[in-house]
């Protein structure tokens, strides 16, 4: 039995990607995997000792800070984010979710010991692994996005599946996420590093690297590897993904070689049984179906939900400053820029054309 993939399918060495920038993305709608992005904010926006950023009442605010300031920059650059939130996870994801909870509990204990022993670098490392996204935080983010005029969609199941459907149906340009699962769900384009561009610390080292947005193309990835999308899904099943453990010792390159010799998932299962002495669980075909036909919202209701609205400066200041102790000066400056941007573009192009 392999280890569960706790952060999506790991196929970075196989994908076809190219750098991009805010100028190239201006005017485009990006369907953002909300949970993936919010975890990034909560993980990276912390105090020096690794503890969460909080307001005077002890409420965490890293998710709000990241949401407000990062999206302010995107909107000012003409990029139009659409946040897609996870719904009810499929039963086959339970093992992954349980494993994540266990990892957080272990990290919390290691964080506590590191702080007691004065190991600051270890404390910051373990603190990032304790990140939790609660229902209350999610509702706060939705309220904040509403104040900013940014549309939100509540997916019936996996947010990445819904975001991928928006892109596949021409309602958005790319899926914004760090994970590659969107490719398995059929997203034509995946946009990585949209919310984390800038200097990033190299794990375990006192080094920083420059990180910028990059586009990953599904069609180019498939062409590069000489496979079809269904085979990419089989590859994800072999190495492990959020819905099932892969085969221990099988990496992307080995999995690619296997799927290129198979014409159906049954062939992959049979190869694993005879050549690798591994029996896939019965739900392996359910995993394939879920990637091919996930539950997603469709139709006119989805299109109506994608409407951008004018930012509400007064409500932004009330929510962020009065309720969560954000700097009045910084929020006022950012909110003023958002309102000006919205008004300028509305006058220049007409609301319907721009948004």
Image: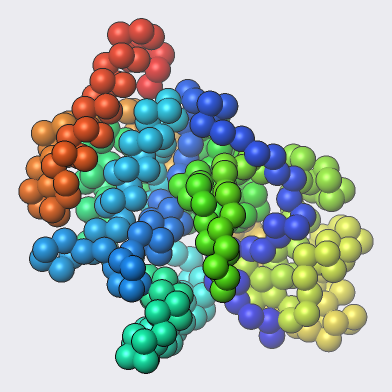
In the rendered image of this protein, does residue 217 appear above or below residue 34? above
Asked which quadrant contains residue 273, the reply is: bottom right
Residue in the picture at 57% in, 49% down? 211
Residue in the picture at 44% in, 64% down? 89
| Camera-nearest residue between 180 and 153 | 180
Asked which quadrant contains residue 254, the reply is: bottom right
Residue in the picture at 62% in, 67% down? 241
Residue 326 visible in the shown view: yes
| Camera-nearest residue between 194 and 265 | 194
Quadrant where the N terminus sits is bottom right
In the rendered image, residue 307, in percent from the top left (x then y), is placed at 34, 28
In the rendered image of this protein, does residue 9 appear above or below residue 167? below
Residue 98 visible in the shown view: no
In the rendered image, residue 197, in percent from the top left (x then y), is placed at 51, 46
Left or right of 208 on screen, residue 12: right
In the rendered image, residue 354, in percent from the top left (x then y), is placed at 40, 17
């Amino acid at each position: 039995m392999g280890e569960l993939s706790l952060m999506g399918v790991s196929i970075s060495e196989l994908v076809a990607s190219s750098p991009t920038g805010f100028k190239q993305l201006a005017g485009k709608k990006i369907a953002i995997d909300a949970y993936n992005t919010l975890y990034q904010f909560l993980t990276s926006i912390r105090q020096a000792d690794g503890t969460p950023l909080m307001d005077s009442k002890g409420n965490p605010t890293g998710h709000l800070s990241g949401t407000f300031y990062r999206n302010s920059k995107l909107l000012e650059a003409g990029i139009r984010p659409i946040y897609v939130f996870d719904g009810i996870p499929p039963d086959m994801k339970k093992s992954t979710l349980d494993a994540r909870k266990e990892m957080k509990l272990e990290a919390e204990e290691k964080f506590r010991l590191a702080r007691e022993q004065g190991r600051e670098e270890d404390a910051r490392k373990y603190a990032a692994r304790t990140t939790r996204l609660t229902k209350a935080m999610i509702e706060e983010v939705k309220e904040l996005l509403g104040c900013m005029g940014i549309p939100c969609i509540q997916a019936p199941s996996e947010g990445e599946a819904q975001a991928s459907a928006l892109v596949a149906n021409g309602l958005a340009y790319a899926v914004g996420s760090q994970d590659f699962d969107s490719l398995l769900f059929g997203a034509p384009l995946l946009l990585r590093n949209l919310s984390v561009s800038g200097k990033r610390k190299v794990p375990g080292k006192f080094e920083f690297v420059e990180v910028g947005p990059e586009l990953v193309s599904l069609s180019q990835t498939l062409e590069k590897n000489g496979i079809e999308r269904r085979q990419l899904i089989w590859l994800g099943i072999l190495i492990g993904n959020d819905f099932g453990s892969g085969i221990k010792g099988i990496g992307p390159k080995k999995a690619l070689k296997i799927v290129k010799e198979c014409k159906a998932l049954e062939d992959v299962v049979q190869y694993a049984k005879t050549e690798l002495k591994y029996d896939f669980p019965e739900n392996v075909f359910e995993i394939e179906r879920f990637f091919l036909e996930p539950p997603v919202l469709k139709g006119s209701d989805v299109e109506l939900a994608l409407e951008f609205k004018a930012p509400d400066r007064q409500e932004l200041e009330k929510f962020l400053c009065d309720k969560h102790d954000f700097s009045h000066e910084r929020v006022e400056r950012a909110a003023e820029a958002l309102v000006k941007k919205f008004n300028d573009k509305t006058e220049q192009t007409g609301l319907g054309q721009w948004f």
